[in-house]
Image (cartoon, helix red, strand yellow):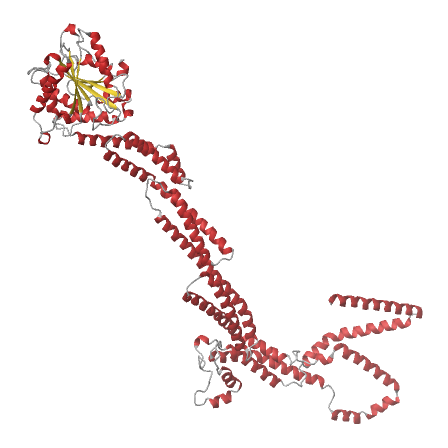
Amino acid sequence: MDKECCSTHLIDGDGNFNVEGVDKFMKEVKLTECGLSYAVVAIMGPQSSGKSTLMNHLFNTNFREMDAFKGRSQTTKGIWMARCVGMEPCTVVMDLEGTDGRERGEDDTAFEKQSSLFALAVSDIVLINMWCHDIGREQAANKPLLKTVFQVMMRLFSPRKTTLLFVIRDKTRTPLENLEPVLREDIQKIWDSVPKPEAHRETPLSDFFNVEVVALSSFEEKEEQFKEQVTNLRKRFHQSIAPGGLAGDRRGVVPASGFSFSAQQIWKVIKENKDLDLPAHKVMVATVRCDEIANEKFSSFTENAEWCELEETVKTEPVRGFGKKLTSIIDACTKEYDFEATFFDEGVRTAKRKQLEDKLLQLVQPAYQSMLGHIRTGTLDKFKEAFNSALNEGKGFSAAARDCTKHCMSRFDEEAEGVNIEQANWDSSKVREKLSRDIDAHTESVQTAKLSELTSTYEAKLDEALSAPVEALLDGASSDTWPAIRKLLQREKEKSVSGFSGALSGFEMDNSTKDKMVSKLETHARGIVEAKAKEEAGRVLIRMKDRFTTLFSHDADSMPRVWTGKEDIRGITKTARAASLKLLSIMAAIRLEDDADNIESLLSLAILDPKAAASTNKSITADPLASSSWDKIPSTRTLITPVQCKSLWRQFKSETEYTVSQAISSQEASKRSNNWLPPPWAIVALLILGFNEFMTLLRNPLYLGLIFMAYLVGKALWVQLDFSNAFRLGIVPGLLSVSTKFLPTIMNLMKKLAEEGAAAATPNPDRNASIQSKSSSASSEVTSSDSAHNKTQ
């Protein structure tokens, strides 16, 4: 029984509260699990009136009892508490030190009042143990006790309603029905005589107390009857807090988990001799206990394995079902709080619950933000992928951006909805706005890259379409060169602008931006022509010399000229120089506008006919090319200034004069080589002066044979040495050429003559065989030459 009732000294005789003992008692009897389903019963009365004996028999406790054989003295010191064994609900009983004890003396009633106030503050049922023979007496021992109870009750600003169960001990033969009215009348008189606060001056006793009366026989004289009566009384304590029970209408109950703290604080206030404000005390207890419960649940949450895993995982990757999981964990935590704090003051409980939720939400918010960050990053990556796929499929840029943005933002909203925690009213709009800004920034960067790529593509097409044709047109400079270039530029520009505008339509840009880009492309096309013109102008001297050489060295059929002496070198030179000057005039300025200019006429007049130019411009200037700009041609369109044209022409003439002089020399050499016969007068002189020698030759035919042989040899040497071509370039070059080839030619002729002589001395068959072999070799040579010719073809 000792272990079951767990008897504990609550407050010792010196008024010290046993905190450790009470906490141990609550753990042993599991009082904290009872909530509001528990009752506290206290007993007070005169010393040595059998209070402990009654409690032990009534509640199966083991309080120390007085030994009658040792005399009547104080047994219980302070306040003891124990658990009633075998009773529902859980009932805690307290045995108070007896009043009117000689140990404390007549004037030391402080502890008496303090313990009585404590019993009224914490108990649902207070048993007042009194002797039967004191009922009806004016100076009975119970009157000071009742006055004490009613006086200390007034110190409770809003006392809880307590059941006062008067236990009449050692009942005599007088029936209880006769004793009870007398007792109630005495109680009422005492109540009326006790000074009350103004607020309770007219308040009846029933508003503060439920008064019950029960009588018991003498334990010493009628023990069996006493025990039977106690057993019947015990039945009244079963379900005492239920409606209709002894404490069925109690109010202001402190939850069982706060009993220890509440009792400790009440005793502290009582010891300090302060008025005890039970409502305020109730709030204070609720505040402390709810704080403790909330802190305990918060600590439990931080150590929750599921939450720790969730928190760690979400740092590196998204967690599926994040919102539901976290909502469930927080909900379980708050439900545990609600279960333990359900019986405390509602206002305090709700406020502390809100604080607990705020702390939990503050704890999990970084994880929530991390999860939103994962969603934002994942959504942005999916947008990039979808956007690139749409563009690769040929979808319009703006349409693709709009559709992909709408889809991805909807997807973000759906996933963010799944991350939301029911207990929190958090808004993901800031993360959504950041995602929107990231998407816009990516779209803008892609648009810039695409537009740049598109512009570069069309610029490259223009470069390919214009560079080579413009170069070719400038190379073959003529009167139609610049009109042809303008026509080419206009055609390619219109073609590119049309395609470029169509490509830009997918970007849905405003007209002003589109016009600027188109204008920039047109400017680029013009820039290509101008750049190519400047490039060709830098090579104009080479072009002029090439043109001069082409026209001077080739005839109208593009065949190389052979200077035979009949050609008009002066006229050819003038024509070639005029063509070169034409090229220079065309390359002197950019003519992309259809504006007439006088560059060609001015150059012709100043260079080809300087005397006429001097007479024409006598009133203006001596040299029309002594200027750094052309008339009516701005500097931006000028490629070669007049001064530069003059310098180029001077250099051109100096570099082409050698070609002309070589042609003249060739022509003179050709004339000399073609005129090899002596003059007519020399022929007549030879006939007259050589008549005798001629007649000698006629008289002696042998001389004719020798002369004929010498003629044949000379003719062969003439053909072999190619005298006509050798002396075409002059006498000295001709002599050098003939002298180098003379000896090899003589040796070759002699070798052939020797072979002919040897062939004539051989017999006819061999000669025929030789002839046949030569024929066969000749035919094989012809065959091989034909096959080689066919291979070449």
Q: How many marks?
A: 0
Give the percent coordinates (x, y) of residue 648: 51, 78
Where is 302 relative to 507, above or below?
Answer: above
Whether residue 721 sits left or right of residue 495 in the image: it is right
Q: Nearer the viewer, residue 731 or 391?
A: 391
Residue 376 visible in the displayed image: no
Q: Nearer the viewer, residue 616 or 441?
A: 441
Rendered view: 202 above or below 216 = below
Q: Is residue 620 visible?
A: yes
Name the quadrant of the N terminus: top left
Quarter occupied by the C terminus = bottom right
Q: Work out whether residue 459 or residue 403 is closer to the camera in this orientation and state it.
A: 403
Asked if residue 536 lies left or right of residue 772, the reply is left
Could you tell me which residue is drawn at 39 percent across and 34 percent down? 306
Q: Nearer the viewer, residue 58 or 32?
A: 58
Give residue 596's position: percent from left, percent from top.
48, 82
The vertical placement of 732 against 142, above or below, is below
Q: Quadrant of residue 515?
A: bottom left
In the image, what residue occupies the spot 11% across and 20% down? 187
* Residue 547 percent location from the top left of the image: 58, 77
Residue 200 horizontal/vertical position (percent): 10, 30
Instruction: Determine whether, in the image, residue 758 is placed left or right of residue 62.
Output: right
Locate residue 557: give its quadrant. bottom right
Compared with 533, 55 (above or below) is: above
Left or right of 293: which side holds 312? Answer: right
